Image (spheres, grey):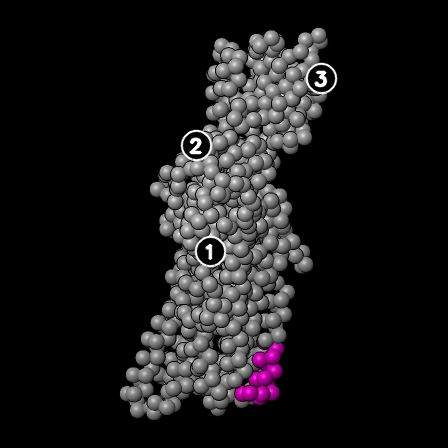
Amino acid sequence: MAASPSADGLSEAVATARLAQYGYNEVEDAPRHPFREFLARFWGPVPWMLEAATGLELLLGKLPETAIIAGLLVFNAVLGEIQDARAQTALDLLRARLHVTARVRRDGGWRSLPARELVPGDWIHVRMGDIVPADCTVGEGSVEVDQSALTGESATVTRAKPETVYSGSIVRRGEASGTVTATGGHSYFGRTAELVRTAKSSGHLERLLFTIVRYLVTIDSVLAVTVLAVALYRGVPLLSFIPFVLILLIASVPVALPATFTVANAIEARELAEEGVLVTGLSAIQEAASVDVVCVDKTGTLTQNREVVGDILPFGTTSNEELLAFAGAACDESTQDPIDLAILGAMRERHASPLPRQRFVPFDPATKRSEAEVRSGDRVLRVVLGSPLVVGQLAGLPAGSQEQIDRLAASGARILSVAAGSGGSLSVLGLVALADPPREDAAELVRSLHDLGVRVLMLTGDTAATARAVGRQVGIGDRIGDRTVATEDPLQYDGFAGVYPEDKFDLVRALQRAGKVVGMTGDGVNDAPALKQAEVGVAVASATDVAKSAAKLVLTRPGLRDLVSAVTGGRRVYRRMLTWTITKISKNIEFVLLLSIVFIATGLFATTPFLIILLIFSNDFVTITVGTDRARISSVPDRWNVREIVTVAAFLGSAWLVLSLTVFWLGWVVLGLPLAEVQTLVFVYLVFSSQATVYIARVRGPFWSYRPSEHLVVASVGVGLAVSGLAISGTLMAAIPAVLVLEVLGIVAGAALVVDRVKIWAFGWTGLLGRVTPSPSPAPATSDRRPSP
């Protein structure tokens, strides 16, 4: 898109033609069709399963249940629409940054135009305070620009002929004119916006749900075919077999899973808000449990994003205070330049006396130095402050000083040289090194994440020397690669220097391809694409609006210490949802095997289709409160290993199956109850054993070793009392004596001790929960926020 520069600018005719060719200088977005997008949310594996369950409920004439499942479908669709709207907000903010006015030369004259009307080849002028409206090549003058929001570089950079200045940069010093080389989506800023639009993290909930259902459907299908073959062999009418098939299919659909995940995430989001973490995407909480790599932007997150004076190296007889006084003479607080403010701040801290100044020349990007004239006694001295190379050309560097400069440069410091003299003769007085210091909490954060088994990678637009210095200081490490190797084998490095927005984005995708669940922190426009691509995008408190809109977690307090709360919160949600999943699969295995075995052996239904549906919904009512439960967290990232989960659930379900068959045999054979009463007895048993399974599945050790939440206890007791009342009164089912209900409760309580031992063995054999941290002392009844084992 480059064009030949011309100080006279383009003609209006040429500009109009190029505007038609390249389009407006803005980030374009495809037209949205909200209603069509909303309808599309009802198409996919998860909606299909819920829609199938709705159809089955309707076929059975269960209108209330049909309405509940349909409500879940609509709720999930609305939640997805909200998340897409949040992503659209990020794009809108990016476009808004380009809505500025530009000084452009057209037809030989200067005029102000909306930046959106710029075209490649336009001759524009920028000066201090301007937002650069498009990518351009400098043709005249020089400027010092702040690119931190684009590239992550903490220090300003100088751009002169024929270097490129990127759109979205802020001019801090100087003036320059140049030729526009790229606009809109083709500019550096526009490519960042395009990355935000195309970035999409891969959520794991839908894959998890589909995998669970696949296991359940496989088990139920095998049993259905087996029972059908037996029924045909015995000559059982197919019409009487249909309710059995419908029961198996309904049992296979985890209707409450999306709602339970939402409840668990919403509760944790409310708790995290009190700890300084604002959750804008609920899925980030559950994903945080599995995060094993966190990519941390250096500037503003690990470091303070401000220049401070580090080393002071005077030469000869000059003292530290004298060197600072001369350096301060070439600075001025009115410019609000970070370097000037850092040196003047160091003067005040060290009580260096300012020198009387007669003349001051601010920093000029063209000469790369600032100057002053000061009175020292009866002499007037010229003071020069600039890079060692520039000052060395004016005054010459003392012998041995180059080694000091190289040492400071290796630490990532920005080095300034101070010279003074009279009569045209200058002498170098010493060196002042500035650095962006690490945050006080950065090292603790890195250590805490490492203790949780999370790898930390540092990303920065700064030099490798700066990255190595910061990496060593905060405990990340000093194996620093550059942008060319970031996607080859990223885990062999501790961080990467000189990276651009597309590099961060590509690095996140490379880690995801390697099977990692990625967290990404950042604060600038440059971080927005990677924040949106990562499973857990985290914007820091000082982040731009664009970064906050692209992220799923926003820290409301300075620093990253609250990121640890997000990880531990995600692991609590994982443990709660693991309880739900094990309970759901184990009970499904138990009662479909119970129905199948009893039907094959006797030709009878162990319980009725209506009671099975009532069982499912009573269980779902309780298991949704699992989202409020206290939970132990692991010291390593949690992953959804469905095969291990199904294995543990199969052992639990098989253990309960022995008892359920015993209960049916006692009621039908020993007690000789009518079939309807036996079916009620089995139903009551299944409800009680389901409640017991929730408590058994929630911890790896004995189920009594960890106190449950009050909500879970109240829901469980409430369901138990309600079901007991229905069974004793004969409401919705055949009545059975109260003594039988109590006996079943006692049998389940005793059996729970045996099943719990099976669970402990199964967890150990599969290694499902891995290592856990030591158990804390019991938490107060009003709080469960303390990290638990």
Q: Position of residue 656 (x, y in %)?
A: 45, 71
Q: Amino acid at mark 2?
A: Pro
Q: Is residue 628 visible?
A: yes
| Magenta region, residue range | 720-733
Mark nearest the camera among 2 and 1 is 2
Main structural element of the magenta stretch: helix, strand or loop? helix
**Circle 1 sits on which residue?**
28
Q: Is residue 778 visible?
A: no
Residue positioned 62% across, 27% down in the render: 340
- The mark closer to the camera, 2 or 3, is 2
Q: Quick one: label 3, few (<14), some, or many (20+) residues within 10 Å?
A: few
Residue beneath disc 3: 356
Q: Indicate which disc, 2 or 1, sits on the residue closer to the N terminus.
A: 1
Distance CA(mark 3)–CA(mark 1): 55 Å
Spatial separation of the CA atoms under disc 2 and disc 3: 39 Å
Q: Amino acid at mark 3?
A: Pro
Left or right: where 780 falls relative to 311: right
* First reached walking from the N terminus: tag 2 or tag 3: 2
